[in-house]
Image (cartoon, rainbow, N blue to C red):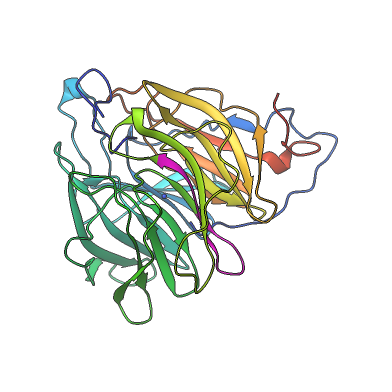
Amino acid sequence: MAVSRWSSVAWSCALAAACGGHANTIDAPSTPWSLSPSQVPDPRLEPGVTALGQQLVVLGGFDTDVQQGLDITQRVDVFDPTAQTWSTLPDAPVAWTHIQLVGIGTTLYLLGGLAGSMYVAHGESFVLETTASPMQWTPIASMPVGMERGSAAIAVSPNRIYLMGGASTANALQSVIYYDLTTDSWGQLPDLPAPRSHPAGMITPDGTLVLAGGLSGLFADSFAGDVWQLPPGATEWSTGLAAMPDARGGCMYGVIQGQLVCAAGEAATSALTYTETYDPLGDKWSENTAMPVPTAGTQGAVIASRLYIPGGARELQFFPTDTLYIYAPLDVVGGDTATP
């Protein structure tokens, strides 16, 4: 959500994705969307969300509404889609929202976020090795001074985690930084063509970074639909690419079969339902089946070609939910590539 600069009544204003196919059968569902009967243990708004192997991780974020004081939790919940059960990991070392959270192998990386009701940007970063005994969060290199952020687009290569744009305490950001897993250090790439908070992002197999949509500021009325690409070794981002059919910020995104899925999000004064898919090779968008309910203020993660969306809000208001929606386009006969 627009850096979640919400008022008490309304908004005041992220992976590496797993790509496993599913065989279609005559019993395939008629819609790619479903609501899991296994709700998130606590309502969540603006948490960090990622896949850790074949499990979904939901970390931090608001877990109460404005009447209850907008508490920010440190809880880390883990969902097993096969067993349909929730468990927990050690609490996060910080209480933040808009967290950049990444799972690689058996390791979680918590890379900055926003603190408190003033959304102060932090660059402190931590790692949790989930096979260690005892399990504990350990500090790693912090973001460079002046580069602290939350709500950045996230993309992952074998040795780097890229954070594209995002929000500082006061502004949307134009900078692109990355964490190097091998050296425990941060680096920087060419700036985006313009500032963006709450964008969607991915990396293609050849290493091209892709950024789509987002907000040009910290408020939902600054929604944008631009698409930019940065090929490996390029000194500036390519522009003039096919824009999103429905411009927005804060969509729940992930990569399914090499394409960027962007579901719901926010624009102007509304939470949205639009679901669209971008093919970076063909520079083409497809309009897909809309999410069943308007949703903003959370992130998504792909597990086995399904996009999981925990929590969020139905309007641009501080009312976290505990639902878990799942988008499974490959489970539908013929896929989901046309407007319903």
Q: In which quarter of the image is the C terminus?
A: top right
Q: Can residue 288 be seen in this view?
A: yes
Is 76 situated above or below 248? below
Residue at (41%, 66%) from the top-left corner?
161
Q: Which of 165 and 137 is in front in this view?
A: 165
Q: Nearer the viewer, residue 31 or 28?
A: 31
Q: List x then y, in percent, for residue 162.
A: 40, 63
Looking at the image, residue 49 sits to the left or right of residue 121; the answer is right
Residue at (72%, 40%) from the top-left corner?
331
Q: List x then y, in percent, for residue 63.
A: 26, 34
Magenta segment: does it hold 212?
yes
Looking at the image, residue 75 sits to the left or right of residue 25; the answer is left
Q: Main secondary structure of the magenta part?
A: strand
Q: In which quarter of the image is residue 175?
A: bottom left
Magenta segment: does it hold 262?
no
Magenta residues (range): 202-214
Q: Nearer the viewer, residue 281 or 338?
A: 281
Q: List x then y, in percent, for residue 45.
A: 32, 34
Q: In which quarter of the image is the N terminus?
A: top left
Q: Quadrant of residue 62?
A: top left
Can you name the residue that lies furthest to the bottom here?
Answer: 183
